[in-house]
Amino acid sequence: MLQFIATYAPQLIIAGIKYTIPLALISFVIAVVIAAAVAVLRSYVPHATGLGKIGWRILKFILSFYVWVFRSTPMLVQLFVVFYGLPKLGISWLSPSGWSAAVMVLSLNTGAYASEAIRAAISSIPDTQREAGAALGMTDRQIFLRIILPQATRISIPTLANSFVSLVKDTSLASVVTIVEMFYLSQQLAAVNFEPLQMYLLVAAIYALFVSILSFPQRYIQRWADRFVKEQR
Amino acid sequence: MLKLEHIDKRYTEHHALQDINVTFNPHETTVIVGPSGSGKSTLLRSLNLLERPDSGQYTIDDRTIDLSQPLTTDTLLWVRRKTGMVFQQPRMFDHLTIMGNMIEAPVHVLKQSKAQATKHAHELLAAVDLDNTADRYPYQLSGGQTQRVAIARAMAMAPDYLLLDEPTSALDPELEAQVLRVLNDLANDNQSMIIVTHNMDFARHAADRMLFLEDGKINFDGTPDEFFNKPTERINRFLNAFKFDQGEA
């Protein structure tokens, strides 16, 4: 058993460091940017009239359509559409490599979920905070950026951390777009050594190890974010 | 001077303000009383346009705003700089320290330098006896303390008129007394104040003028002496309701 681990764990961990972790980190950063932008735009109540109002309505429809599409279809199918489907359109910049297809789908998918978490956090800030800012003469923009968003950020951290954990594991789907990440490698190895049980248990353990290490900073981020709330006992 | 003329506000099932005409003079403490649902808060909130009346004229100094017309953001912000507001709950910005709460609007709305705003904030906090709390977060203070910070925070904007909407209703009597002392000091400094309150002792003591509202109309407008010592039959009934030993169940 120890012999088995010593033989295979190093290659798997290297594949993890080369593919799984960068894939997860890059996708997550992009996802959070997408999510924040989508959540802020969808939460914004515009005062616009006429054409501006129609513009906003179209934009909000597009954003909610995006969230709906990515939340209601399997990620595996999304990967197939992007990697195998899009090149059939014959447009060069829409024919992603395995890497870009994986990053694209992982970040758009995670972004869709995370945007809902951030949106919920924004709407959980009571309207009395907005009124307090308004009574001090702050503009809507100042109130949103300086009063609402900082408080919403704290509330959305646990959910975002959860999304990140899911994302780390979802990188295993990148195996279907030819990226030899940990899981794909374990499949290849199992096909040679005929030890699928030990092989897949080992790769599962390494995923668990990665998730644990990567979510370690969450505790500190949360503690920093909670500096202005009463300690939960 | 704040002057409201023919102010009307109607909700779907409730006529909150009916043809209100009233002028608030500078350097006076006006206390607004009346039964629940009489329109006291709506009237007060109309003064800084957190509530938008359906119609009427609102004059501040020599500028008159027609409330039946759409308001520009500039007008709205101008009115809010003239009037400070303290709510029933302190409504601290929980993510900011006490000092952060104090200087947020002076720095970002009035564009004061941080140093200048901080210096002024220390003075205002000292006036409410809380300068030692500047670096704490709001959750670390009691309700009475945060309400005093809320008053100081509103005063940091140097409003011409300070509006207070039942500022002590959420506090127990001991904490209430602390807040009332702060308001009393402000009244003695000739700060113009308009206060909605249920505290009759405070009204009797601090008011220069009493307004009694009922069903969205001003039912009484006069001095505290008239209000408390020569009350009309209706006001007498209202005042007696506060004395539970004389009232009927």
Image (tube, coloured by chain):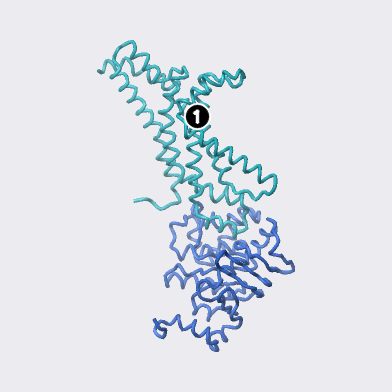
Q: Position of residue B244 (x, y in %)?
A: 41, 81
Q: Is residue B241 left or right of residue A209?
A: right
Residue at 46% x, 18% y: name it: A179
Q: Let me know if residue B176 appears in the view.
A: yes
Q: Position of residue B121 (x, y in %)?
A: 57, 60
In depth, the one of B70 and A231 nearer the eye is B70
Task: State the quadrant of the C terminus of chain B.
Answer: bottom left
Q: Position of residue B208 (x, y in %)?
A: 60, 80
Output the chain of dot 1.
Answer: A
- What amino acid is at disc 1? Ser
What shade has chain A been given? cyan
Q: Let me know if residue B158 appears in the view.
A: no
Label 1: few (<14), some (14–19) or many (≥20) C-alpha neighbours in 10 Å: many
Q: SS class of the residue under badge 1? A: helix
Residue at 37% x, 14% y: name it: A188
Q: Is residue A86 left or right of residue A72?
A: right
Residue A196, picture quadrant: top left
Label 1 sits on residue: A27
Q: Position of residue B229 (x, y in %)?
A: 53, 88
What shade has chain B been given? blue
Residue at the top extreme?
A192
Vertical order, B114 against A186 (above or below): below
In depth, the one of A15 and A200 nearer the eye is A200
Residue at 32% x, 21% y: name it: A200
In depth, the one of B141 and B161 nearer the eye is B161
Q: Is residue A175 left or right of residue A208?
A: right
